[in-house]
Structure formats: C-alpha cells, structure tokens
Amino acid sequence: MVDRANRPSALNAPSAAAPGPQVDISGSGASSKVTATLPSGESVEVLLYGATVTSWKSDGGKAENLWVSEKAALDGSKAVRGGIPVVFPVFGPPPKDGHPTSSLPQHGFGRTSRWEFLGKSTSEDALDSSSVKLDFGLYTSGLTEDARKAWPFDFGLVYSVTLSKDSLQTVINVRNEGESSFEFQFLLHTYFKIQDISKVSINGLLGVEYIDKVLNASTHQQSDASLTITGEVDRVYASIPQDTTTILESGTPRFDVVRDNLSDTVVWNPWIEKAKAMGDFSPDDGYKNMICVEVGAVKGWQKLEKGEVFEGGQTIKSLL
C-alpha cells in the first residue's frame, strides 16, 4: 500500500471509560422518581406524581436550589409542597362562570396526575456529557375518571426537564388531540431555596402591572426596580416585556429566571400566618428560606384548535 503524505489524521474515538450522565428510576407506584446526575455532580430529581421536580443541585452537586417542605407529601396523596409543581389546565381556583375548567380543583390536575417517563436524551455531540434531557408525558387516557369528566378534552402533554452544569430548563408542549378546541392556563410553580427572605430582591419587573391578591385582587404597577419581600406577597405580573427576572441575595444575583414564550410571572411568599396555617408547610418559619417566582401563561386563556400545539417554559440559571 502506498503511504500518502497528506492522508487525514485518525479521528479520536471517545474513550469507552468516559462517563456520561447517569439516569436512575427508583421507588414504586406514586412514589416513583427519576434521578439524573452529570459526571460533574449536578443532579435533578423528578417525581412521576405530577412530574414534579423535587431537587435540583448545581455547583458540583453541593448547592440545592429548590425548597421542599419537610412535610411535603411525596407518596402521591396530594400535590407536593415545594420543588416545581406543574399547574395545568387552570391556575388558582377555577372560575365559577361555567368555564370548562370550573369543575376542576385549584391548579388543575397536572400536579396531581401520574406522568409517564418517556426516556432520556443527551447532547448530539458524543463527546459532550454536560447535559441530559428527561421527557415526561401525560395524556387524556392517564387521567382519573373524575378528571376526564371535569375536563372532557383530548390532549397530550410532553414535559421536558433538561439538566445542564449551571442551569435547569423546564418546557411544556401542549397538543390538542381532539376534535374541539379548548382553553387552558399553565404555570411552573417554582419554589426557590434562599438563605434569608429579608435579604432577597427581585429585578426585572419595573413598570409591569400586577394583580395583588393580598389586596383584594386590585391592580397596581411595579414602581421600584427591585421588589423586596416584607410580608405576605401574592402577585400576578402580566405581559412582562423582558424575558429575564433575577433573584438576588444581599444584592448579589443568585438566579436568573428566563421565560420562553410565557409572558406572566407570579411572585409568592406566604409569610408568617399563612405558613403556620398550611398543614404541609414545614417548618413554620420555612417562609424565610423560600421564594416562589413562577413563570406561566395565566392572564386570560391560551386557546388551541384541533391539532394545534403550544410550547413554553423557562431556563433557570444558578449564578453561584
């Protein structure tokens, strides 16, 4: 064989020993969960009940970013208090005006249904093991009989949770698989773990109108560049012009919450009395260590005709 002077160099095949993301399924029944861990130590846990993210650790696995109540039900008996519950197809108490969601419980059935684990996928680059995507599905056939009666539409949901070294992306895909149109709302009810609520501020909402549920659902406008928490807060900020909301601790950015095709954000902290009144909120002073910044489409309704698809979500960046 003639030796060519300019033959292409051999490709470096990935080492068989090179570690990739690990995905494990544990538990049984309603307590089943999927855990993904990157070679660098970052991890995410998703309970199949509600497809609820119950843990997200960054910084090599040393920093837990989500708050979960010590009394949270993780056995499928009720919605999880903490993590990232999926709110669908109605936000808050359903309207009482005969709307198709009127017979549903508060926050709908997404967070209280058992989802299917559809599998994992990693980066297309075989040498890149820095992210892993987990997909979960919920369909009409997976609902309880009561839920199907209360909301008799044919739909399909695919919820994708993508873990990267410094971020977590959570995206919902909603498809109308029936003959008639339907309306829905959607929210990712994210509980962020923080060190001290008195030192937390939230930027990115200046000038935005909000509905203040603490003040009889009256409408106001955010007049300060930084929102600080000094008591119970329950606000729906609608039609936010910029995509990123930043949570700061002691003036230092801690999380960037980047919305994708979602225009609304809810900010919630129960404060002292409400925290004590909730049986699954623990410890009583846990309100000091959490803040909910929840992206969604909750002002009005999203409408899907037959065969149409809606997709929206968030990317949370840990800024440690």
Image (tube, rainbow, N blue to C red):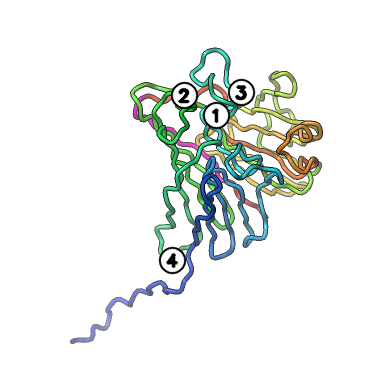
- Answer with mark 2 or mark 3, whichever residue precedes in sequence: 3
Residue where numbered disc 2 is placed: 151
> Few, some or many C-alpha atoms within 10 Å of disc 4 (few <14, some 14-19, many ≥20)?
few
Residue where numbered disc 3 is placed: 93
Q: Amino acid at mark 4?
A: Leu
Residue closer to the observer: 223 or 106: 106
Judged by depth in the image, the label closer to the viewer, 1 or 4, is: 1
In the picture, the disc for residue 127 is: 4
Residue where numbered disc 1 is placed: 108
Image coordinates of residue 80 in percent, x first then y, are 62, 40
Q: Is residue 213 visible?
A: yes
Compared with 257, 34 (above or below) is below
- Answer with mark 1 or mark 4, whichever residue precedes in sequence: 1
- Find out whether the residues at labels 2 and 1 contact each other: C-beta distance under 8 Å: yes
Compared with 36, 89 (above or below) is above
Real-space CA distance between mark 4 and mark 2, rounded to the nearest whole angstrom: 45 Å
Real-space CA distance between mark 2 and mark 1, rounded to the nearest whole angstrom: 10 Å
Residue at the limit of the structure toward the top, as seen here: 97
Judged by depth in the image, the label closer to the viewer, 2 or 3, is: 2
What's drawn in magenta, residue-wise? 306-315
> Few, some or many C-alpha atoms within 10 Å of disc 1 (few <14, some 14-19, many ≥20)?
many
Image coordinates of residue 119 in percent, x first then y, are 42, 51
Q: Is residue 246 visible?
A: no
Q: Amino acid at mark 1?
A: Gly
In the picture, the disc for residue 47 is: none
